[in-house]
């Protein structure tokens, strides 16, 4: 346990931040999984969820939950998946 008052405060704030970050990271993972699952159902549903997932990624990066380059990489990979789905449907 901290003996210094400022260390005590840092312990409390870091615990709060850890919980908030864990919640945001969990929501982010859930959004990505929902999007990837929706790729099987169809393009329209997947595109709706893509926008929501992109927003989650941007907000997580802005809040410092994930690095901005990590968000960019994940967004790029999601876009690649939706583009592949669009090309597959256009080819049929």
Image (cartoon, grey):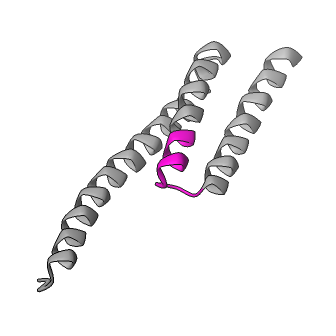
Q: Which of the two residues, 52 or 35, is positioned nearer the viewer here? A: 52
Residue that sits furthest to the bottom in the current view: 3
The picture places residue 41, in percent across and down from the top left corner, at 58, 19
Q: Which of the two residues, 28 or 21, is positioned nearer the viewer here? A: 21
In screen coordinates, is 89 left or right of 20? Answer: right
Asked which quadrant contains residue 88, the reply is: top right
Q: Main secondary structure of the magenta part?
A: helix
Asked which quadrant contains residue 2, the reply is: bottom left
| Residue at image coords 55%, 41% | 57
Against 10, residue 71 (above or below) is above
Residue 92 can be seen in this image: no
Residue 56 can be seen in this image: yes
The picture places residue 78, in percent across and down from the top left corner, at 67, 38
- Which residues, given as a range, are shown in magenta? 57-67
| Residue at image coords 61%, 22% | 46
In screen coordinates, is 27 left or right of 41? Answer: left
Asked which quadrant contains residue 70, the reply is: bottom right
Q: Which of the two residues, 36 or 55, is positioned nearer the viewer here? A: 55
Against 4, residue 43 (above or below) is above
Quadrant for the C terminus in the image: top right
| Residue at image coords 78%, 22% | 86
- Please say whether residue 68 is one of the residues in the magenta stretch: no
The picture places residue 82, in percent across and down from the top left corner, at 72, 29
The picture places residue 11, in percent across and down from the top left corner, at 21, 71
Residue that sits furthest to the right in the current view: 91
- Please say whether residue 63 is one of the residues in the magenta stretch: yes
| Residue at image coords 67%, 56% | 69
Q: Which of the two residues, 92 or 46, is positioned nearer the viewer here? A: 46
Quadrant for the N terminus in the image: bottom left
In screen coordinates, is 69 left or right of 65? Answer: right
């Amino acid at each position: 346990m901290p003996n210094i008052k400022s260390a005590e405060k840092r312990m409390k704030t870091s615990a709060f931040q850890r919980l908030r970050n864990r919640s945001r990271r969990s929501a982010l993972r859930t959004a990505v999984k929902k999007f990837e699952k929706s790729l099987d159902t169809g393009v329209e549903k997947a595109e709706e969820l893509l926008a929501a997932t992109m927003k989650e990624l941007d907000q997580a990066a802005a809040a410092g939950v994930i690095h901005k380059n990590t968000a960019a990489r994940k967004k790029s990979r999601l876009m690649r998946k939706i583009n592949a789905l669009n090309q597959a449907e256009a080819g049929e």
